[in-house]
Image (cartoon, rainbow, N blue to C red):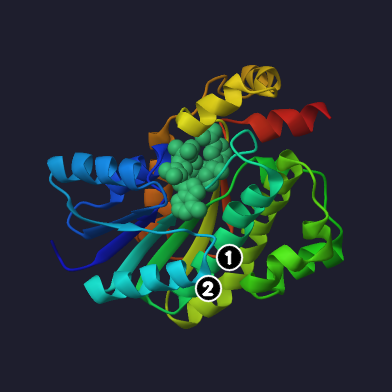
């Protein structure tokens, strides 16, 4: 282990695959809300030879996120961060989706901007839902991009959201906007930050979405996509490793759509 720290927030399907991919030779700090799932993934990766520290976090709680960032910095230079914690529309009501997917990602970007090491990089897992959601009012987008994280849930157009699918679409669009905004402060520290927008990925969350009421529509979108298949957690881990690694040092403040061609197919047919 070279002393560098890689942080993976959210140890579900994608978090585990990303941790496995980027953890080698580093101290891997895994964090999740679900203590049991966290312990199990930490054990699995330890069993595979990784040096792992596991820590509870609630990404919707500013104090909890700040403590996680401090704990990461106390382990060594924070060179990589993958933020994968999220709730999908079938998993939770709108307020919970907004708290985790909108506020959570923003709090993580703010807190880790204070501790990331020079040469470090982050990826935030957004979603193709952010690309498929109807255009937002430019003034609303400006607010989503720029207000302090702690003020996001009080924005009138956020507080007015009544459906989980709208909460998810707005949160995931906001993830891209927050990453654009964060590129400046992260750059001032010699660090980079990008988003990845996955399509349908075979994780517990992806499976729940396929089993939910929009499952038929998702299957139809996959069928008409350029690849015609569901994505694997490792498809996302490969993209994360690229964006976090030495081949991406000129890439910051942007988003990589890793959706097997679904958004392209939907846009061509509209
Ligand atoms: N699976 C898909 O098809 C898909 C598609 C597009 C985007 N995404 C996004 O990818 C990310 C990862 O999803 P996944 O498929 O690995 O899902 P997953 O459900 O397997 O993992 C998500 C993890 O986030 C954790 N989490 C939830 N609330 C939290 C909180 N408050 N604090 C800390 N951790 C919390 C959960 O405990 C879980 O371990 C999410 O942001 C999701 O929205 C998933």
Height in image: 214 above or below 58? Answer: above
Height in image: 252 above or below 99? Answer: below
Height in image: 17 above or below 137? Answer: above
Residue 225 percent coordinates (x, y): 63, 24
Q: 212 or 112: which is nearer to us?
A: 212
* Visible residue check, residue 236: no
Q: Residue furthest bottom?
A: 188
- Tell me, yes or no, whether the two marked residues, 1 and 2, touch with CB atoms within 8 Å: yes
Cβ of disc 2 within 8 Å of ligand 1? no
* Visible residue check, residue 174: yes
Cβ of disc 1 within 8 Å of ligand 1? no
Count neighbours of disc 2 (C-alpha within 10 A) and say few if under 14, some if 14 to 19, many if 20 or more: many
Residue 256 percent coordinates (x, y): 55, 49
Count neighbours of disc 1 (C-alpha within 10 A) and say few if under 14, some if 14 to 19, many if 20 or more: many
**Residue tagged by mark 2?**
110
Q: Quadrant of residue 140?
A: bottom right
Residue 143 percent coordinates (x, y): 77, 69
Name the residue at 68% across, 45% down.
168
Name the residue at 71% across, 41% down.
164
Name the residue at 72% across, 39% down.
165
The N terminus: image quadrant: bottom left
**Residue tagged by mark 1?**
106
Left or right of 210: which side holds 156? Answer: right
The C terminus: image quadrant: top right
């Amino acid at each position: 282990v070279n002393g560098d720290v890689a942080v993976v927030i959210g140890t579900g399907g994608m978090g585990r695959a990303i941790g496995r991919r980027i953890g080698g030779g580093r101290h891997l700090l895994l964090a999740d809300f679900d203590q049991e799932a966290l312990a199990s993934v930490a054990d699995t990766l330890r069993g595979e030879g990784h040096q792992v520290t596991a820590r509870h976090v609630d990404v919707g709680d500013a104090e909890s996120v700040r403590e996680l960032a401090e704990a990461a910095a106390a382990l060594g230079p924070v060179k990589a961060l993958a933020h994968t914690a999220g709730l999908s529309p079938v998993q939770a009501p709108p307020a919970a989706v907004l708290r985790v997917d909108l506020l959570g990602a923003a709090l993580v970007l703010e807190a880790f901007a204070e501790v990331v090491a020079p040469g470090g990089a982050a990826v935030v897992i957004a979603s193709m839902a952010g690309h498929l959601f109807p255009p937002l009012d430019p003034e609303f987008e400006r607010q989503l991009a720029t207000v302090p994280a702690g003020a996001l849930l009080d924005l009138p157009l956020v507080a007015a959201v009544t459906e989980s699918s709208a909460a998810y679409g707005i949160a995931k669009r906001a993830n891209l906007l927050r990453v654009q905004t964060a590129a400046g402060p992260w750059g001032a520290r010699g660090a980079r930050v990008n988003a990845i927008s996955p399509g349908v990925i075979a994780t517990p969350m992806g499976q729940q979405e396929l089993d939910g009421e929009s499952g038929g529509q998702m299957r139809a979108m996959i069928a008409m996509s350029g690849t015609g298949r569901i994505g694997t957690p490792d498809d996302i881990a490969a993209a994360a490793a690229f964006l976090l690694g030495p081949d991406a040092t000129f890439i910051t403040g942007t988003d990589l759509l890793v959706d097997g061609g679904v958004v392209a197919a939907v846009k061509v047919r509209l």
